[in-house]
Image (cartoon, rainbow, N blue to C red):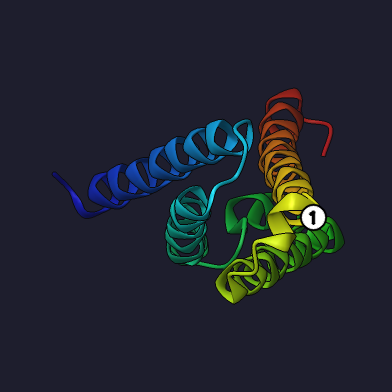
């Protein structure tokens, strides 16, 4: 496998892992949270906190969304805004992890962490969609020739 193909395969595996973890998290949040369930949720959140920066590094080898900026440097503000949203989303997950690590069961009875994680998953999904939309818009603009 050539280096670029290997990098692409690693990025694909990382993305697949994230979506599997999100699916597991979504399923766990649909059930009443027990102390044991809280430990599993924490494990999944920790795995996401490990995988997200790895994916971001792989996507950003030449700079975050560099393939877009090479063709459309005037889109720099849009790209920086997306990257800023990524860091905010990551920080929010780290805050939720800290709450989970506190291990207080009252957090689960009030559902604050459940609500926070559900909102976080929506932020993650929205960010992924906005990245894809921007890449698609760049490709379509390039093909259409109306940059």
Left or right: 98 in relation to 92: left
The N terminus - image quarter? top left
- Image x and y of residue 15, in percent: 44, 43
Residue 8, compared with residue 23, is above or below; it is below
Left or right: 139 in relation to 59: right
Residue found at x 66% / y 36%: 132
Which residue does the numbered mark 1 point to in the structure image?
A: 112
Left or right: 120 in relation to 101: right
- Image x and y of residue 51, in percent: 43, 59
Left or right: 36 in relation to 83: left
In this rendering, the count of numbered labels is 1
Q: Is residue 55 visible?
A: no
Residue 2 or residue 35, whichever sits in front: 35
- State which quadrant residue 84 falls in: bottom right
Seen as rendered, the residue at the extreme left is 1
Residue 52 or residue 134, whichever sits in front: 52
Residue 51 or residue 136, whichever sits in front: 51
- Image x and y of residue 93, in percent: 65, 63
Residue 58, compared with residue 144, is above or below; it is below
Q: Is residue 101 visible?
A: yes
**Dot 1, how many residues are within 10 Å of its Cα: few (below 14), some (14-19), or many (20+)?**
some
The C terminus - image quarter? top right
- Image x and y of residue 25, in percent: 54, 41
Q: Secondary structure at mark 1?
A: helix
Residue found at x 17% / y 48%: 2
Residue found at x 61% / y 75%: 102
């Amino acid at each position: 496998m050539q280096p670029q193909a290997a990098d692409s395969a690693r990025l694909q595996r990382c993305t697949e892992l994230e979506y599997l973890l999100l699916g597991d998290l979504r399923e766990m949040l649909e059930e009443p949270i027990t102390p044991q369930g809280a430990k599993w949720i924490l494990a999944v959140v920790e795995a996401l906190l490990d995988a997200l920066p790895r994916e971001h590094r792989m996507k950003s080898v030449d700079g975050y969304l560099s393939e877009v900026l090479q063709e459309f440097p005037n889109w720099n503000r849009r790209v920086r805004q997306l990257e800023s949203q990524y860091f905010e989303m990551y920080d929010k997950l780290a805050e939720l992890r800290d709450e989970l690590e506190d291990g207080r069961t009252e957090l689960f009875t009030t559902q604050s962490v459940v609500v926070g994680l559900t909102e976080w998953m929506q932020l993650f999904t929205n960010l992924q969609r906005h990245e894809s939309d921007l890449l698609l818009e760049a490709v379509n603009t390039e093909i259409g020739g109306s940059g």
